[in-house]
Image: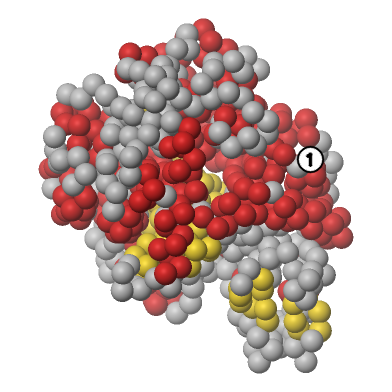
Amino acid sequence: MDRIVRINMSDLTTSIEPVPANWVGLGGRALTSTVVAEEVPPTCHALGASNKLVFAPGLLTGTSAANSGRLSAGAKSPLTGGIKECNAGGTAARMLAKLGIKALIVEGMPKDDKWYSVHVTKDAITIQEETETVGLGNYCLVRQVQARFGKPVGIMSVGPAGEMKMLSANISVVDPDVHIRSLGRGGLGAVMGSKKIKFISIDDAGTPPVMPKDMVRFKDAARIFAKTLLDHPVSGQGLTTYGTNILVNILNEAGGLPTRNFTSGQYAAHDKISGETMHDTIVARGGQPSHGCHPGCQIQCSQIYNDKDGKYLTSGFEYETIWGLGANCLIDNLDDIAEADNIMDDIGVDSIETAVMFGVAMEAGVLPWSDSKEMLRLLREEIGKGTPLGRILGGGAGQVGRVYGVTRVPVVKNQGIPAYDPRSVKGIGVTYAMATMGADHTSGYAIATNILGVGGHVDPLSKVGQVELARNLQIATAAIDSTGMCLFIAFPALDIPECLTSLIEMINARFDIALTGDDVTALGKSVLKIEHKFNLEAGLSKEHDRLPEFFSKELLPPHNAIWDFTPEELDAFWDF
Amino acid sequence: MAYKILPDLCQACAACESECPNRAISHVEKLFTIDPTKCTQCEGVYDSPMCAQLCNSDACVPA
């Protein structure tokens, strides 16, 4: 029987409740955003006692459906001031689902200055004072915690950045190989740190997998679903072979690879940091070019990247990180970017926010362009140790722009713009402007249709059709984020009709219900509207649904593209 | 007797791997295999082998 677990950090108590009727049909993002909207005052301080941090597996998590093991986390974001949902792989979501925990809600805040850890098993949820791991980075922490329990428990943790409540702090989730995945964006690590929780560990011993109500029907659908993932060229070949970093060369060719803090769309040294180069380097050094971020991942877009001596350097080495420290900061040394990725995972900062921040910091003269060694020092010695400069840098791109008086600051709702220039890929620009999350490519990944030819083609340089594209993708994404599915299932879902029908069929067989495609679309719309209402009440008005001014003033080479949407055109996004 | 995974049927969805109580299943060259020296057919843990219960493509069969 599914249940809701509450962890009250004000009085250090836990409670288990039945699932309220209006939450029964929800999972993942739909559930975290609903809980936040119902229980968190929109105008509260995100780092105060009124905010809540909600973890939820998706509707299909815990079953044998491929790629269904994503964990959603939600709260009011200290970075954007609006609602936030992040999702990540790792082992925690599957464990929570097997334990029948539909949502784990952390609320309140301790009155003392002690740190705590939370341990979840099928028999008990316990809060303990934590001393041993306080101050540790995430890599050391996960090894110590798993050694403490003597088994591969699931872990959600914060590094030093979360302890210091930096706005770029993320929450780390341990993966099946004891590496790190991240609930990256919006400063959720600062929220967890504000509640003085260093880590939450989960032991699913004694719990079987989640069994669908109609197993035969479920298996028939799951088989078809898995085949569509294998058959699509992006999910079945491209991502598996090169990971997300396949995009460096593709975006460079399209003139949409933001370079030198968004002043050009092409990077001369793109090949040195490309997915193709990365793949060959990984193979030559005995790493793993394909790797799953969670149990049940079929796409395997993650990887393990070794150093020159064949020793582990980092994993889950994503395009957005490589772009951000690479083209955006003019760093063409993939090993240095990999080392930075490892440090960011360890200290627990969002690798997108931090990379965008370094572009602004270089523009401000805090460090020279291309200076990867100084970038590594700033990460390790300043941000990681929380010096005054580190606290400024750890506040993200917007904060550094304000402190140093920089006007070219690529943020929306104070969250750094990732990896795709909105002037030359206009569909993603609409997503950045309108997303309830702030600038977030995963909210409505228009790159698929603008650049990759998935789900048809909409000319990336034209305004025509972009608002409708971004709206439809954001609705679909909000629904997918609620199932526990990896967003990359959207590639086959956009091109192969059986992918979506089998996905809906799996949900129906899991719960013995009869959802239609229209129901799923309605769920996505409902999630967006709940989030939008929260943001409006939090003070994020339509004037915040805009890109920074410089995108409308500065032409972007090589296409000399400009951002030219009117406010009225953008506001039409919400006409549904 | 142990179970095995038929490579022609395996879709590499990984559903079985994390649920094997003996950690007998591993990922090898895009497919999954069962170590027969570790497989106990889930005796004493589940009513029937969990990999076969979970496999969506009927690829987990007696060796």
Chain label for disc 1: A
The answer to whether residue A60 is visible is: no
Most foreground residue, A437 or B25: B25
- In screen coordinates, is A9 left or right of A575? left
Identify the image quadrant of the N terminus of chain A.
bottom right
**A269 displayed left or right of A291:** left
In the visual, does A371 lie left or right of A283? left
Binning the other alpha carbons within 10 Å of mark 1 as few (below 14), some (14 to 19) or many (20 upward) gives: few
Residue A507: x %, y % from top left: 76, 48
Q: Please name the residue that numbered disc 1 is placed on.
A: A497
Q: Is residue A1 above or below residue A353?
A: below
Residue A422: where, in percent of width, then height? 44, 25
Q: Quadrant of residue A447?
A: top right
- Check the picture and name the quadrant holding the C terminus of chain A: top right
Which quadrant of the view contains residue A462? top right
Residue A381 visible: yes
Q: Amino acid at mark 1?
A: Pro
**In front: A120, or B30?**
B30
Residue A45, relative to residue A250: is it above or below? Answer: above
Residue at 31%, 69% in the rendered image: A308
Query: Left or right: B14 with respect to A409?
Result: right
Residue A570 against residue A426 in the figure, above or below: above
Q: Is residue A498 above or below residue A130?
A: above
| Element carrying mark 1 | helix
Residue A407 on image: x %, y %: 23, 21
Q: Position of residue B34 (x, y in %)?
A: 68, 81
Q: Residue at x 37, y 62 (%)?
A: A314
Q: Nearer the viewer, residue A398 or A1?
A: A398
- Residue, x 75% and y 74% (percent of image)? B7
